[in-house]
Image (cartoon, rainbow, N blue to C red):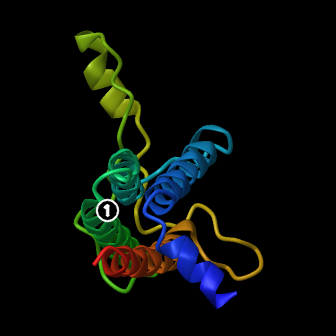
Amino acid sequence: MKNSIIKILSCSRLMPLLMAGISAASLGMAFMAQYVFGLAPCILCLIQRWPFAIIIVLGLIGTLLSYKYQKTVAGIMGLIGLTFITNSVIAFYHTGVELHWWPSHLEGCAVPDLGTDPNNILAALESTQAVRCDEIPWADPVLNLSMANYNVIFCLGFGVIALISAHLIWKKEK
């Protein structure tokens, strides 16, 4: 079992693509929560989406380079790990704001749909309900964890996995 896990983690062709897929699925779930279930994101929620997009790009680049440049793929996996951990830090900050451990300078921000007509911009801004960062729009009924809480755990775990993978890929190619 341990050897199988090490073999997967040290596979320079699989791991970048796997990380890109995990990030794409994460973004898909965020968009589903927003557009299917009507959970409007606050500005911190939107900021937490950017690292996932960056990881998708890095993962696809790593996959393309995996056939010739193993050491570069190890570096890309390291960047993916750091990006996941950065997202975990952002999510931890968001968790602190939700739990009122500290205030956010971004509270009350919303991203309105301004449309394309310049005459409607002011009306759109005035009619937009602000989505507060310090309110939890959804928490799971079992553990009472918010999406930001889950993002801390999820991104920290995958960040560590990606860093271990980077180390194993680098070591394998020595």
Q: Quadrant of the C terminus?
A: bottom left
| Residue 117 image position (x, y, % from top left) | 29, 10
Q: Quadrant of the N terminus?
A: bottom right
Residue 113 falls in image quadrant: top left
The residue depicted at 44 percent of the width and 79 percent of the height is 156
Q: Residue furthest right?
A: 142
Q: Is residue 150 above or below residue 30?
A: below
> Residue at 63% across / 89% down in the picture?
2
Q: Which amino acid type is marked by label 1?
A: Gln
Residue 44 in the image: above or below residue 155: above
Q: Position of residue 96 (x, y in %)?
A: 39, 81
Q: On the rendered structure, is 138 left or right of 106? A: right
Task: Quickly name the residue at label 1.
Answer: 70
Report crowding for label 1: few under 14, some 14 to 19, many 20 or more residues within 10 A (C-alpha): many
Report the front residue among 50 and 76.
76
- Residue 127 quadrant: top left
Image x and y of residue 168, in percent? 40, 80
User: 5 or 45, which lies in front?
Assistant: 5
Q: In this rendering, would 143 be left or right of 102?
A: right
Secondary structure under tag 1 reads: helix
**Residue 136: which quarter of the image?**
bottom right
Query: Residue 58 appears at what percent x and percent y?
Result: 33, 52
